[in-house]
Image: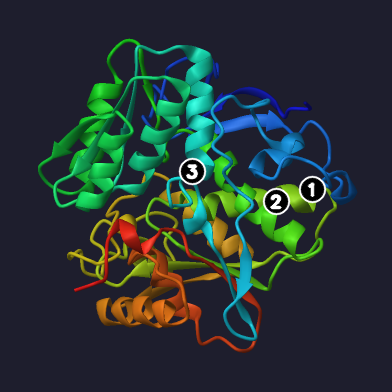
């Protein structure tokens, strides 16, 4: 199999590098997340995809890892129309019922090659269930940190996959801090969907699939729910790669959607800031969209830059809009968790341009909004 030529981790803030075979989970200078410095092995040719494996691994030329042993058949989810201009990509049909499988398989595959003593992850639920499942597939011991109040269905799923579950008092940020403290111990692989760039190279396949399903083009806009921004940054990465390979001419606008209750990135965007504001203008309150309730995303600068470079924007949705959108999608046949309906709530009424929304988590994971 052809592979992309991974060279090193690279800190986008200060240029520090580390070997990808190390267990160094963040930049040792600034403690920020890594990017991945690598070159695509060869351009993708649409005609070469016929007959390949029906999973995200069909895009072998642009992935930073070779033939997988941990795959559960992730990727290649259906794209279906909801209206004349809005289509939905059904990523809740992934093996663990969320889009996080796209990145989790990359982290598990990387961890398997490094033989750590234990894999550690933190999550509001879906990333944790995905990492637990792929570590089970790989035979790797795994601990997942989640905040108190995480959906019981998600914690049940994590335990079912054999992972050790650590429930952290407090919010999502407290959970991340607990996991990062554990990740500093010797022999630990931190399967962070935020800090490890291999995760983004998994989520970028979402857009490669759109490109393939739409016969070599992309919609006018791509809407994504944004907390830590892993799907949005993966989408931006794929768009850049597709343009560099001469496979698309247009750059879709990235429409980033946050819950009004927790919208630090939308606040910064509207203020014209390059990073998070010291005092966000919006509320930081409980929200039904638990998967994007991230008050201080570590990749905030990259997220804001990607949205601006695409000509996109940030939109926020209320709790009532989330409730209504979940019921509306259910009436159309799609039972989606509350975080996963945010984009439909934001752009479902658009009629002036084509847009794709991800239905990125199954409703069974959270149940109906109260």
Split into 4 quadrants, where in the image is the N terminus?
Answer: top right
Distance from label 3 to label 2 (Cα)?
22 Å
Asked if labels 2 and 3 touch by Cβ distance under 8 angstroms, the answer is no
Distance from label 3 to label 1 (Cα)?
26 Å
Label 2 residue SS: helix
Q: Is residue 238 left or right of residue 287?
A: right
Q: Earlier in the sequence, mark 3 or mark 1?
A: 3
Split into 4 quadrants, where in the image is the C terminus?
Answer: bottom left
Does the rendering let one see residue 78? yes
- The residue indicated by pointer 2 is 240
- The residue indicated by pointer 1 is 244
Asked if labels 1 and 2 touch by Cβ distance under 8 angstroms, the answer is yes
Does the rendering let one see residue 197? no
**Dot 3: within a 10 Å radius of its alpha carbon, few (fewer than 14), some, or many (20 or more) residues?**
many
In the rendered image, the vertical position of residue 135 relative to residue 152, given as above or below: above
Label 3 residue SS: helix
- In this view, the residue in front, 49 or 346, is 49
- The residue indicated by pointer 3 is 101
Q: Earlier in the sequence, mark 3 or mark 2?
A: 3
- In this view, the residue in front, 72 or 342, is 72
Residue at x 65%, y 43% (from the top left corner): 56
Distance from label 2 to label 1 (Cα)?
6 Å
In the rendered image, the vertical position of residue 264 relative to residue 183, given as above or below: below
Residue at x 73%, y 61% (from the top left corner): 213
Furthest residue toward left: 169
């Amino acid at each position: 199999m052809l592979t992309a030529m991974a060279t090193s981790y690279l800190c986008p803030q200060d240029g520090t590098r580390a070997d990808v075979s190390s267990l160094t989970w963040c930049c040792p200078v600034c403690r920020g997340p890594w990017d991945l410095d690598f070159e695509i092995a060869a351009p993708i040719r649409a005609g070469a995809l016929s007959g390949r494996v029906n999973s995200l691994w069909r895009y072998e030329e642009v992935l930073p890892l070779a033939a997988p042993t941990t795959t559960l058949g992730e990727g290649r989810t259906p794209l279906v129309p909801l209206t004349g201009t809005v289509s939905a990509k059904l990523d809740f049909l992934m093996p663990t019922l969320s889009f996080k499988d796209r990145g989790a398989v990359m982290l598990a595959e990387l961890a398997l090659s490094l033989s750590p003593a234990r894999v550690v992850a933190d999550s509001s639920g879906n990333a944790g269930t995905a990492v637990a499942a792929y570590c089970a597939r790989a035979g790797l011991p795994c601990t997942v940190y989640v905040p108190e109040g995480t959906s019981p269905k998600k914690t049940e799923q994590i335990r079912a996959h054999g992972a050790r579950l650590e429930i952290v008092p407090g919010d999502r940020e407290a959970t991340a801090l607990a996991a990062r403290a554990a990740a500093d111990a010797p022999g630990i692989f931190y399967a962070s969907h935020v800090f490890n760039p291999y995760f983004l190279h998994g989520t970028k396949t979402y857009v490669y699939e759109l490109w393939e399903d739409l016969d070599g083009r992309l919609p006018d806009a791509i809407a994504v729910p944004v907390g830590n921004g892993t799907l949005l940054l993966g989408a931006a990465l794929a768009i850049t790669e597709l343009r560099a390979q001469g496979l698309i001419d247009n750059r879709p606008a990235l429409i980033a959607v946050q819950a009004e209750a927790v919208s630090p990135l939308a606040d910064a965007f509207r203020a014209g800031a390059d990073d998070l504001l010291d005092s966000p203008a919006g509320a930081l309150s409980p929200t039904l969209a638990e998967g994007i309730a991230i008050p201080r995303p570590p990749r905030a600068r990259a997220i804001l830059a990607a949205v601006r470079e695409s000509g996109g924007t940030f939109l926020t949705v209320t709790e009532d809009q989330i409730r209504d959108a979940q019921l509306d999608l259910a009436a159309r046949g799609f039972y989606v968790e509350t975080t996963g309906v945010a984009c439909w709530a934001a752009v479902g009424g658009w009629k002036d341009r084509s847009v794709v929304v991800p239905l990125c988590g199954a409703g069974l994971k959270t149940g109906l909004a109260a």
